[in-house]
Image (tube, helix red, strand yellow):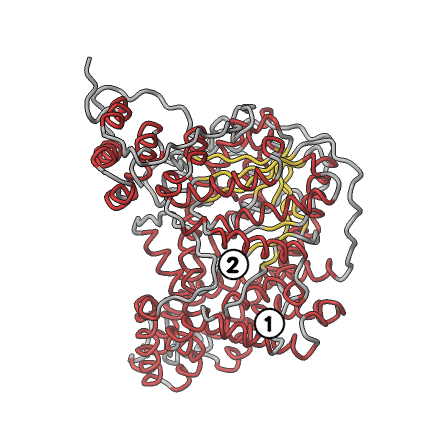
Amino acid sequence: MTASPLSPDAAAPAAAARPVDPAAPARPAPRPFAAAMPPEAPLPMPVQDLEHWDPADGHRPAARHAQPWLARAFVFGGAALLTAYGAMQMYEVVAVSGGTTALQYVLLALFTLNFSWIALAFTGAILGFLVLLRRGTTPALPARLATRTAVVMPVYNEATARTFAAIEAMRAEIDATGLGEAFDYFVLSDSTQGDAWIAEERAFLELRARWGGARARLYYRHRAKNHHRKAGNIGDFVSRWGGAYDHMLVLDADSLMTGSCVVHLAAAMEADPDAGIIQSLPLIINRNTLFARVQQFAARIYGPVIATGLSVWSGRDGNYWGHNAIIRTRAFAAACGLPDLKGKPPFGGHVLSHDFVEAALIRRAGWSVTMLPALPGSYEESPPSLIDVAVRDRRWAQGNLQHSRIIGTAGLALASRQHFATGIAGYVASPLWLAQLVVGIALVLQTAYVRPEYFTSEFGLYPVWPRFDPVRALQLFGLTMGILLAPKFLGLGLALIDGPVRRACGGAVRLVLSSLIEILLSALIAPIAMLIQSGSVFQILLGRDTGWNPQRRDDGSIPWSDIVRRHRWHMALGLVTGVAAFAIATSLFLWMSPTILGLVLAIPISWASGQLGLGLALRRLGLLMTPEERDPPAIAVQAGALSRRNAEAGLDDADALSALHADADLAAAHAAMLPETAPRPRGVIDPDRALAQAKVVEAEGIAEARAWLTPKERMALLHDRALLDRLTRLAP
């Protein structure tokens, strides 16, 4: 039977039929290639049933662990009492006239919901503050580790200069502890861009060669289909290779962890046979734009207070943030096979924010999920501007709202349901705040322009006026602001009494000034974020899926035209609201002025947020400084130097097809790393592959192939050994 010109078997003969330039030098035979992955060690990873659960199927703890009931009573009981008090005061504010209208009851309900959210954060921060007053010490490193840990870094169209520098720096630090033999390193790629994929392979091959070739314990795997995205990426690794490892340390592409931190996490897993996940607290480093440095400062000064409180009341029912954490592979495989939710995205389909769900399921199975917020040496980076955060936040909003479909899962611990509820409330709070502002404006309009109802259905001697108690309202506003800002002041207080931290932040005066700058900028950004998050929630409720775009991690600014396009409606709404509020009542304008000001200045604030010059100017003044910025961790310095060295090699800027064409060893290694695929069924044609084949066969040189092939056709070619062989035979 004769092969079709578009069949996979036709590529090699077609290549041979085309005349070869006799002047072209013969390509040397490629060197032997060591396997990119170790032999598979499968672990069964069954899909979990969210509707039924039998506790007998889970892990039986080796010891009885006490629950932090006292801490939970303090946090949730205190928040409930504060919320009740705030609701009573709000009722007194709106009921001063002796009667309450339906609109006032709506305002009361919205205020109570919003107040409960900040009250819970307040009591949790109080708990964290009290615990941190008694600072502990980090234990000594263990003399040996009896278990093996896979350090896994999932990547998705990331810059290889940065990611492989992080892996190399972490390996050096872990080896320096003398316990490096207990760790293997995996780069797990889900990249969908051909240039990024080949750049990863080139970086992997070069780093493995520097580490000793086949003995390097560095591995790389690229998935042809990024099914279920990061959760599927990790799940694929666990189900195929997880059996060879007791634990896996899960990283993000911007993660960085010291050798001491990694070894302590592995030792903590060994010491606790019931531990399923142990989460570290990553601090933000290496940020220079104004917005990123504000986030970096806030995470360093306020973050430990909030995280410590969360850790204490959660106990062994903690949460997982998806990275910088160590996980018991056997527990993860048995408990964390995520099902697809019924229906279409955004509420159906695969689980988007998988980390919360994995923590809840592993806890349901009897394993503990804990946090070590005081363990130093765990770092990450943050988006550089307000718009970049908004892009990431849109995906997080969808993932957290999707948890409304999961919060009722059978067998979950009550604390796990609370983590889901907290995540959902974090995004629902914005439209609730927006609704509270709208209802407040409506009530002022009613008071100013609507004729009062003099005689109601109930007998009374005086007419019903929709009035407010201004003195009590001002007191309640002060109470709300105090509770809202208290976690910041508590974190600032701890930093002020900690001599090394205070000095590293520039001294007491600069530390206080930095906090005031952070509070001011956060206050201006808050109404913009409110509208962005409210818009995200409304889009999700309307059924619009977010997709999954790679996160921008550089310090580059966003074009002015993009900023104007993104924020013009925010500015317009601020102007309209300001004019309307001033026309209604001066007091309403003054009450809403912080919100109005933030919206009117949305465009310049967003522009300033991504400016490298503004962030560095504050740094030169010693403002928004953190200890890690004043005295960078050795691993961050090393990773930065390695990243610059990697960037000079230009792997991220190279064209994938040209790189493969020019390097026979790279082309052979790439072909060897491709998974074996089943033969194509007769009559089933992949359009991208068919077009790629036709174009490569037609091309007379690599330049034409590069010009003709679309991104999808390039990916089809890169997955096909026959087309790769044809590509390498093209004329230069």
> Dot 1 surroundings within 10 Å: few (below 14), some, or many (20 or more)?
many
Position of 418 with respect to 650 (left or right) is right
Taking the spot 35% from the left edge, 45% from the top edge, the residue there is 346
Which circle marks residue 382 in the picture?
Answer: 2
Q: Is residue 720 above or below residue 126?
A: above
> Dot 2 surroundings within 10 Å: few (below 14), some, or many (20 or more)?
many
Q: Quadrant of the N terminus?
A: top left
Name the image quarter holding residue 176.
Answer: top right
For the image, the number of numbered tags is 2
- Give SS at disc 1: loop
Q: Nearer the viewer, residue 174 or 94?
A: 174
Residue 464 is at least partly visible in this image: no
Task: Name the kind of residue labelled 1 in the image.
Answer: Leu
Residue 692 is at least partly visible in this image: yes
Q: Is residue 132 above or below residue 186?
A: below
Taking the spot 80% from the left edge, 47% from the top edge, the residue there is 140
Q: Which residue is mark 1?
A: 624
Q: Quadrant of the C terminus?
A: top left
Q: Nearer the viewer, residue 222 or 517?
A: 222
Task: Name the kind of residue labelled 2 in the image.
Answer: Ser
Position of 450 with respect to 597 (left or right) is left
Name the image quarter holding residue 392.
Answer: bottom left
